[in-house]
Image (cartoon, rainbow, N blue to C red):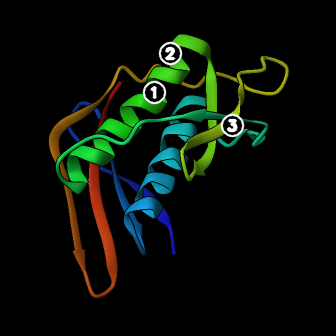
Amino acid sequence: MTSYRFVPHTADIAVELRAQNERGLYQAGVDALRELLVGTATVAPAQERPIEPRGGDPTERLIHFLSDVLYLYDTGRFLPAGVSASGVYGEPFDPTRHEAQREVKAVTHHGAEVESDERGYRATIVFDV
């Protein structure tokens, strides 16, 4: 089970992620970020981009991972399709198939939290838009 849902937030966009493991949280975060960037447009897993893991705890690792994915989009218009063992795979933005929905400025530390229990992992992330 990997999922996400957008939750009410005063100014930015908050998302709640759920998954069986930490890597599943990354996938749920990528799915949510992609929807913010290009809606429900299909993104092909055509190319892979490495992302170096960093951060001292699951919350920091998730924030850094999603920030790196957003950086790939901002600097090279690389859209994420999914999480790989060494980073993320996807394809470049194609204006004939993708329509930009909104600008995402950052993945914030505000209210970010990863928790785990017997049912898996849950995280809350806020995107600055």
- Residue 100 appears at what percent x and percent y? 62, 21
Label placed on residue 52 = none
Asked if the residues shown at circle 1 and circle 2 are in contact, with their CB atoms under 8 angstroms apart, the answer is yes
Label placed on residue 70 = 1
Amino acid type at circle 1 is Leu
Q: Which residue is mark 2?
A: 74
Q: Is residue 52 above or below residue 125?
A: above
- Residue 39 appears at what percent x and percent y? 62, 37
- Residue 48 appears at what percent x and percent y? 67, 36
- Is tag 3's residue or tag 1's residue first in the polypeptide sequence? 1
Q: Residue at x 44, y 49 (%)?
A: 29
- Residue 18 appears at what percent x and percent y? 39, 67
Q: For this view, does 19 lie left or right of residue 8?
A: right
Q: Residues within 10 Å of mark 3 (few under 14, many from 20)?
A: some
Measured in 3D between alpha carbons, the distance from the residue under mark 1 to the one under mark 2, in whole angstroms, is: 6 Å
Q: Residues within 10 Å of mark 2 (few under 14, many from 20)?
A: some
- Is tag 3's residue or tag 2's residue first in the polypeptide sequence? 2
Q: Which residue is mark 3?
A: 90
Which residue is outermost to the right? 96
Measured in 3D between alpha carbons, the distance from the residue under mark 3 to the one under mark 1, in whole angstroms, is: 13 Å
Q: Is residue 90 above or below residue 124?
A: above
Measured in 3D between alpha carbons, the distance from the residue under mark 3 to the one under mark 2, in whole angstroms, is: 14 Å
